[in-house]
Image (cartoon, coloured by chain):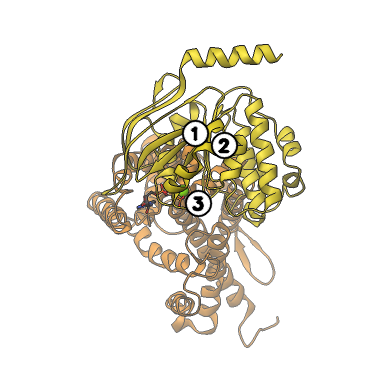
Amino acid sequence: MFELLGIPPQALFGQLLLGLINGSFYAMLSLGLAIIFGLLNIINFTHGAQYMLGAFVAYLLLQYLGVGYWGALLLAPIIVGAFGIVLERLMISKLYHLDHLYGLLLTFGLALILQGLLRNEFGISGLPYNIPSQLSGGQNLGFMFLPNYRGWVVVASVIVCFGTWFMIEKTRLGAYLRAGTENPTLVGAFGINVPRMITLTYGFGVALAAFAGVLAAPIYSVNPNMGAELIIVVFAVVVIGGMGSILGAILTGFGLGIVEGLTRVFYPEGSSVVIFVIMAIVLLVKPAGLFGRTA
Amino acid sequence: MADAMLQERRDANTQGALLKVSNLEGWYGESHVLHGINFDVRQGEVVTLLGRNGAGKTTTLKAIMGILGKRKGSVVFDGTELIKLPARAIARLGVGYVPEERGIFASLSVDENMMLPPQVKPGGMSVEQIFELFPNLKERRNSQGTKLSGGEQQMLAIGRILRTGAKMILMDEPTEGLAPVIVQQIGRTLEWLKRDGYTIVLVEQNFRFAASVADRHYVVDQGKVVDMIPNEDLEANMEKLHAYLGV
Ligand SMILES: Nc1ncnc2c1ncn2[C@@H]1O[C@H](COP(=O)(O)OP(=O)(O)OP(=O)(O)O)[C@@H](O)[C@H]1O
Ligand SMILES: [Mg+2]
């Protein structure tokens, strides 16, 4: 067996995989935030709660309707996305003409309410959600053991992230979205229904968070605080990547997950703060973020 | 052929105005900018709005298009009152907009910019026809929209509207800051559009250009229309116009 810098490969690759898994969630969540911020100009503080809702909807679908993992992976994003659309229509849309701060306060408040309600109902000890039978077990790769489900999470998130990137950067629909992000007034003056586009975009960003939540359910236990803990790191990721860049959000998400994993190997004490240290440095050196466009 | 065209024009006259703007007022926030704009445009006419910087020409076009925050009065287009409609509904009635800042999207390629405005009426030009009209654009289809020269961006801003089938076009200073050859090319385009029956409301600072394409000129000053001069009377009214425009 070989060793790298005195670290056994099992530990190194184990942490790298863990980093990649975390990075998958960072990427999916910061991607949704970036899309929403681009078109709606609000920082969606409810994003973490919507991720958590995705996991809860998966849990409830199983408990009460017998809908399993694969069904939930499809249904939970639709259900939570629809809930997002209702939120946007009834509340968020009333704030577009006001300062950003109001959107932030509203979405932050909504997150607290959602978490509080679920904590009341389900407590904080966490509910179990099983790995689907098709993905139980794992592969011995020689240098490490890869649990199938974790491999699937990385693959699924790469597909969803780059599928979303492709849709936004390379299709007709994406061109509307990019144009609307740049100059919604002119897009409206061409006859395009911008308010509807905004609503659907919000729904899509929220659905993405819920999808990540379902992926997370078998890894982390389903509990009301799961989003609140994650979202703080995701906001740091977004700041580092630069608000509003789609590819930037994806690459920064995966990249920082890996950096975090490596830090856990080489300097474990620093692993919980490394992302925030990077954020501080980026803010000092390149305030618009690594991929951000300077205004 | 000529008879038919004359007849058509006479019919248009008896039908009255395609666009009728009455007592149009407009605001940016609290600031009251339009104080009662009145003018009308007949089917197939090219009409200019002339006026000093800050007179309210751009604001008038925005108010017609429905993208000014607060507006009141009346704007009737093809028999429909627009004043309460959102911009997208106005566009869907067949009003095209070529903004002063051209509005080319940096995150879209030339092709994507071209395809962005949806078709609102039948009978728009095909992309191939538009590229025939503006061959420069064709060579740069895959470039980023804002990498084009100023003149090319202007052609793109006009070209993409021609695809939509809009039959009335609001054009805000299409020649601003462009080289004389490009101005000529845009002039030829406008003549061609006019022959094709388009109705055009043109904001212009370039006098000679305006005179070469327009049927009538409205003079805007401090948020009001203060005069109307038919193109054939332009020479005779030069002195008056210079006084209005402060040139
Ligand atoms: N976004 C805005 N907010 C506030 N005031 C504005 C805004 N845009 C224009 N104005 C003001 O409204 C008035 C009319 O401006 P407008 O742009 O309509 O003039 P214009 O006739 O198009 O001038 P120009 O020939 O310079 O383009 C001016 O006094 C201008 O300062
Ligand atoms: Mg102007």
Single out the residue that lies furthest toward the left: A120
> What is the display colour for chain B?
yellow
Looking at the rendered structure, the kind of residue marked 3 is Glu
Establish if A8 lies above or below B88: below
Which residue occupies the foreground of this view, B128 or A236?
A: B128
Protein chain holding label 2 = B
Q: Secondary structure at mark 1?
A: loop
Looking at the rendered structure, the kind of residue marked 2 is Pro
Which residue occupies the foreground of this view, A90 or A180?
A: A180
Answer whether residue A83 is visible to the viewer in this image. Answer: yes
Single out the residue that lies furthest toward the bottom: A6
Write down the residue under mark 3.
Answer: A182
Few, some or many residues within 10 Å of mark 3 (<14, 14–19, 20+): some
Residue at point 76%, 37% (across, down): B132
Residue at point 56%, 59% (across, down): A150
Q: Dividing the picture into quarters, in which one does residue B39 lie? A: top left
Circles 3 and 1 in contact, beta carbons < 8 Å: no
Which of the marked residues, 3 or 1, is nearer the chain's N terminus? 3
Distance CA(mark 1)–CA(mark 2): 7 Å
Residue B235, position as x, y percentages in the image: 55, 38
Write down the residue under mark 1.
Answer: A191
Establish if A223 lies above or below B217: below
Protein chain holding label 3 = A
Residue at point 68%, 51% (across, down): B180
